[in-house]
Structure formats: structure tokens, C-alpha cells
Amino acid sequence: MDRRLILVVVFLAIQIVLPVRYYAAKQDPFDERFAWRMFSEVRMLRCRPMYRQSGQPIALTARFHVAWINLARRGRGDVVAAMSKRLCDEAMGSPITLQLRCVRADASVVELSDPSVDQCAK
Amino acid sequence: MRQISDWLAAVFVEFRVERERAVLFRFFFFMVVAVDAWLNIAHASRYGAGDFNVSHFAWLDAALPVPGRMAMTVMWMVQSVLAVRIALGAGTRWLPWILTTLYGTTYFISQIDSYQHHYLVFLALLILSSVRFDRRDPNVAGWPFRLLLAQISIMYLWAVVGKSNALWWDGSLLLQQAGSSELLVAVAKFFGMSIPVLCKVLAIGTVFVEIALAIAIHVRVLWPFVCAAGILFHAVIELAGFKIGLFSYFMIAIYLLLAPLVLSRRITTAWVPKWPSVSKNATLVSLVLALAVGAGCLLLVPLEGVVGVVIAVSFVAVVLQSEDGDAGTQPVLAQHASHAIACVVLLLLHVKTDVAFDYYRFLGGDSRRRADVKTAIFAYERTVEINPTYASAFRKLGDLYRLDGQLDRAREATRRANQLAPIGKPRQRGGQGSRR
């Protein structure tokens, strides 16, 4: 087969299959990257990440750029996980908890994190 | 298997695009890439803040350092210069590969940029790097263009799949995201319908338009209609006020590939200059002149890392003075001129936009919030250099100087702030671009 055709087939296969991962694997239903989902209900998700260290609220704007906080507000799982890891690394053994309450486009509420779980123990 | 291979060959390998269409598309698409790269710079301060980053792929986090704002600024400025050069048809053999690598780096290195249209542009650049614009055939071997159109179809069809839910079909999502748009209000009023009903009609219509475009884009005889429909569709999306960056402009540029041939010929015949061949001495003079003009323009842009940009693009200009041999050699004069023009365009972008002002303003705000006083002072000092009438920056400088123990400077900054905008009166905003 012509080398160009091989490239075309590989490219098209990746582009057709990659979005399937969002619908089939659904590791993070709020991570729409590479799935060509636009103006979706997931985009309208509004979360409120509230971290606490030993019960005291953490001012996120002092620790992270607001761009990352905005991604956490959209429920982006691996960003939240990285933020939790960073806070744990800086906490020196103190427990860090996270309440991540989100409101969907249909006004239903979903809790994406258990606020009783120590993020650093995961 | 052989039948599939033959079919694929007929669809892709034998696909041809008239040179005029390819040139028109190339100009507009890469000019939008240049502008988009420039506009990204305003938000460069997000990168590396607090040494925190999450890239699009976990292996990238391990492989690359946390990107800093200066590195991102340099990469975007270089992208902008290279994109203008490609738009002008200079360096089309190797520059697209360099541009694609830089673009992919700046996109995938951080989830701060999760715009889907940037992902689409990366894929488009990757595909278009295989186009041999340097060859002078009247029809450009078009398998990359066919692949680009196939990618657009895939995007539309998956977008339709993503809209397969009740909230889209009843117009609720569109109402939430664009219900207050002036355009929608005006259209609803014109047709005498309520905005929720209009949103429902538009939501359903969008699905059918996307399906229709995904299919019709491959039917050559329909290209003039698809071109008009696609441009109109994305122009309406842009006018509806969705916050989607330059996505609509990229799509409009792509639809220019399908523009009527007579239009493409008329435009490109009028625009494309005929460059003469010149002597070796004149070549050296033109190179030196181009490098001097380029460096002069770039050094007037008050952004961090601009010296690095001058070095990078000058290096490219010197190394890529001519295309590969055989039929594709482009007059050296065109290469030099395009370098100079690209740098002039970058300077014009600086003059006409608030990017440099916003870069420092956002850097100052973020540094302040993270109690990085030194960086915040640096950022606000640059802000007032660009706009000496921005009272808010002087006020913040006063506070920051005070925190840093620079009391005389604090007094002077506060005095200046009160002079420009006494407490109780409306505050002034904006950089030099907004004064126009």
C-alpha cells in the first residue's frame, strides 16, 4: 500500500476511535478533550472546589493560578487530582479534604468528591 | 483489501486542488494562525505560575519541564512570525513542520489551553505540512486537503453525537450559553418568536447543518454552496457571541478552500507578486536588510523573551533562504521580504491590540494574589510603561512598593494614581489598543 495511504488510514482511525474512549471508557465524564463535544451539558457544569487542611479552609487563589481553579470548577478530574497532590505535598502530613460539589446544566447536584476522605491517604 | 486500497487511492491520492484555491486558503488560514498565536501571549502568565502544571498527557509531565511564561511567549511569537511567512508562500517546504512542532508543544504541554479548536488547528497543521506548495504544478497534489476535509467531517459528526441529549434538542443548552446574545434577541424579535423557541429551532437546525456539511464537503460540484453555507454558519456562531476564541475564523479560512475557482483566481492573480532573480551581492544586501528590519520591529515589542525571538526567527531566515532544488526554488528575494513583512506584521499586531498590556496586567494580578511582590512590581511597572494613564496599576504599585519597603516610590505611585483617577471617580482601563 502507498505510504501516503497508510498515513491517511492511521490518521483517520485515530480520529474516529479517540472520541469513542469518551463514550465507552468514560474514565472522567467531565473531561471532554479530544471528543469533539462542543457546547455540551458538561461544559455547563459548575463546581465549587473547597479544600480544607486539618479542617481549615485553604485559599486556593494563593496557591494556584485562577486558570487551574477554573478547570477544577469544571470538574476536570486530573487537574483536581494534581491540585490535591500539590496541597498534600505542602501539607507535611496534615489531612487535606476536598468537597467538590457540582451543579449540572439541568440544575441537578452531584458530589464529585467525598469530603470525609483524606486526599493525602489515597 | 485491494479494492479498499484502490478506493482510498482514488479518494485521496488522486485528489487535486487547483493552485489558486490552495494559495487563497493558505494565506487566510496561516494568517489566522499568526493572529491566534499572538493573542495567546496575553495569557502567558498562567504558565508556570507556582511551578504547577498538568499537561494533556501524563507522560508529557514526566518528559518536559513546567513551561514558564517566557518560554511560552517566545514560542508563540516565533509561531506568529513563521505563520505569516507561510501565509505569504515563503518557506512552505520546512517551516510548516517547525510551526506544527511548536504549536503542538504549546498546546499539549498544558491543560490551561484546552480549546478544542487549537487541537483542530494542530491536526490541520500536521496535515498541511505535507502539502508541496513549493512545487509549481497548476494543481496541487491534494491528499492532505482531502484528509483535512475528512477531519472536518469527523469533527462535525462527533459534534452531532455530543449533542444527542434532551437538553440540546429542547434548546436549553443553547439558551443558557447564548440566550442573551444581541443577535439572537434581534432575530427572535424579527420573527416574532420567544428566545427559548428560537434556541430550540437553532439547536435542531445546527445538528442538520453539521450533518449536511460533513457530507457535502466531499462533493466537489457542491463546493460553491458548501463554501457559502459553511462560512455563513460559522459567521453566525461568531456573531452569537460564544466564547470560542478564533474558532469561527479558522473554519471560515478552511471553507475558503472550497471557494469558487473564478474568485480564487481573481484574488490570487491580483495579490501574488512576481519576484525577480537577483545577483549574489544583491542577495546579501537584501538578507541583511531583512534581518535588520525584522530585528528592529521585534525589538520594539515590549515583551519578555523578545531577544530570543529575534535570534530564532533570524536563524530561520538565514538557514531557509531557498526552497529545495528542482522545480520548486523560490526567489531568494521573496524569502527575505517575507521575513521582514512577518516581523512588521507582528509589530502591527502589537500596536493594534492590548496583548502586551494584558500580558503584564495579568502577570501583575496573579503575582499579587500569590504574594509574589517582586514579580508583581515588575509586571505593573511594565504595565504603566505601556499605558502611563492606567491609574489602577499605579494604585497597585503604591500598595506593592509599600509592602516591599520602598516608601518613597509608594508615595509617588499613589500620588500618580490619585492624579489620574481620584478616589470616587470612575476608573480608567485599557492599554494602547483600546485607546483607538
Image: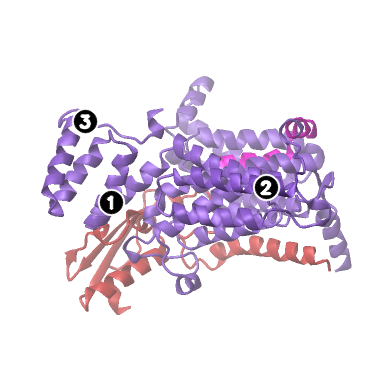
Q: Is residue A105 above or below residue A9?
A: above
Label 1: which secondary element = helix
Residue B378 is marked as 1
Residue position for label 3? B420
Q: Is residue B256 magenta?
A: yes
Label 3: which secondary element = helix
Q: Is residue B417 above or below residue B95?
A: above
Q: Is residue A108 magenta?
A: no
Chain letter of the residue carrying label 3: B
Quadrant position of the C terminus of chain B in the picture: top left
Mark 2 neighbour class, 10 Å CA radius: few under 14, some 14 to 19, many 20 or more: many
Q: Is residue B55 left or right of residue B10?
A: left
Are the residues flagged by discs 2 and 1 in contact, CB closer than 8 Å? no
Identify which residue is drawn at 34% across, 35% down.
B430
Residue type, label 3: Leu
Determine if marks 2 and 3 fall on one subunit.
Answer: yes
Total of numbered circles in the picture? 3
Residue range corresponding to the magenta coloring: B248-268
Residue position for label 2? B335
Determine if marks 3 and 1 fall on one subunit.
Answer: yes
Q: Is residue B245 visible?
A: no
